[in-house]
Amino acid sequence: MKKILLLSGAFLLSVCVAGCHKVCTCEDYGGRIHEYTVEEVDAHAHGNCSEMTEFPIPGNYSYCHW
């Protein structure tokens, strides 16, 4: 029983680590969705996804969120 619990826990941990990645999702005024990586948000908006509305030009997106 312990072995099953340990294997289940290891599997869930690996899925959580490998299966999740943070993406900043922005919608433009035409309804198109654009996604940016954490590195891109760090480079262009100091790590603040909501400030990506100004990238690459001011007022480019209606909203951005993680």
Image (cartoon, rainbow, N blue to C red):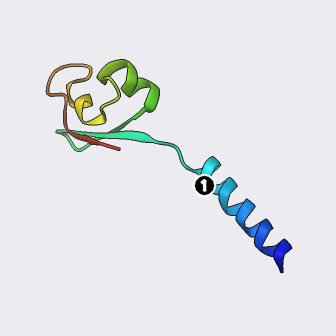
> Which of the two residues, 47 or 28, is positioned nearer the viewer here?
47
- Give percent across and percent down for residue 29: 16, 39
Task: Tell me if 12 is positioned left or right of 26 in this view.
Answer: right
- Give percent across and percent down for residue 16: 60, 55
> Which of the two residues, 54 or 3, is positioned nearer the viewer here?
3
Q: Quadrant of the N terminus?
A: bottom right
Residue drawn where x is 19% and y is 40% of the image: 30
Residue 44's place in the image compared with 36, above or below, is: above
Residue drawn where x is 85% and y is 72% of the image: 3
- Give percent across and percent down for residue 58: 15, 22
Residue drawn where x is 21% and y is 31% of the image: 53
Which residue has dot 1 on it?
A: 16
Residue 46's place in the image compared with 9, above or below, is: above
Task: Tell me if 35 is positioned left or right of 52 in this view.
Answer: right
Task: Tell me if 6 is positioned left or right of 54 in this view.
Answer: right
Instruction: Classify residue 65 by image quadrant.
Output: top left
Q: Secondary structure at mark 1?
A: helix
Residue 59's place in the image compared with 6, above or below, is: above
Q: Name the amino acid type tagged 1.
A: Cys
Rate crowding at label 1 as few (under 14), some (14 to 19) or many (20 or more) other CA atoms within 10 Å. Answer: few
Residue drawn where x is 55% and y is 49% of the image: 20
The residue lying furthest to the front in this view is 2
> Which of the two residues, 37 or 3, is positioned nearer the viewer here?
3
Instruction: Classify residue 12 by image quadrant.
Output: bottom right
Q: Quadrant of the C terminus?
A: top left
Instruction: Classify residue 44 by image quadrant.
Output: top left
- Give percent across and percent down for residue 32: 28, 41
Q: How many marks?
A: 1
